[in-house]
Image (cartoon, rainbow, N blue to C red):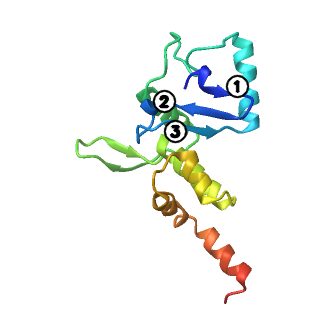
Amino acid sequence: MKIEDLDFTNGFIRIPKQNTKTKESRTARIGKEVLSDLKALLHLEKRKKGYLFRSRQGKKLTTRRIQQILHTYAKRAGIQKVYAYDKRGRPLHTVSPHTLRHTHIVHALLNKVPITGVQKQVGHKRLTTTQIYSDLAPEEVKEAYDKAGFE
């Protein structure tokens, strides 16, 4: 993410096509609190351009480094577990960057964000891809049945 891609006025970040799986650029919403915190950080560091999150050397964080950081904090929080091993015998962990994405989608759906809005936010080409996540939110099904008075 680059600072230049942040739209502080409208609360969006532009995601260039080279940073997406679908190779199509998009915008994603950023909450007011996060934007406020980012503004404060950038003001404190007196930065107006360049990579938003940087290494100690001032370079962009690699995908691998982000995975390592998340792994470290998940382990410290006591929520990092090995659930399987890949073909090379490397451990697969329960908390990954994709876990954050997955959690965001499920919570957005549980909080009644329209599914088409969630689809656009996360960049799914097909609505059916986003709908898969609604199957993973049993609370939503229970609530719908309870509201309908279905026994």
Pointers 2 and 1 in contact (CB under 8 A)? no
Query: Which element type, helix, strand or loop, lies under badge 2?
Result: helix
Of the two numbered discs 2 and 3 on the same chain, state the one appearing first in sequence: 2
Question: For residue 38, which numbered disc appears in the image?
Answer: 1
Residue located 51% across and 33% down the image: 72
Which residue was labeled with disc 2?
66
Of the two numbered discs 2 and 1 on the same chain, state the one appearing first in sequence: 1
Q: How far separated are the C-alphas under marks 2 and 3?
A: 14 Å
Give the percent coordinates (x, y) of residue 119: 55, 52
**Circle 1 Cα neighbour tier, 10 Å, few/some/many (<14 / 14–19 / ≥20):** some
| In the image: residue 113, left or right of residue 136 | right
Residue located 46% across and 56% down the image: 126
Q: How many marks?
A: 3
Q: How far separated are the C-alphas under marks 2 and 1?
A: 18 Å
Q: Judge by depth and name the residue closer to the eye, 145 or 13.
A: 13
- The amino acid beneath tag 2 is Ile
Residue located 30% across and 40% down the image: 90
Which residue was labeled with disc 3?
75
Of the two numbered discs 1 and 3 on the same chain, state the one appearing first in sequence: 1
Q: Judge by depth and name the residue closer to the eye, 144 or 65.
A: 144
Give the percent coordinates (x, y) of residue 104: 59, 49
Query: Which element type, helix, strand or loop, lies under badge 1?
Result: helix
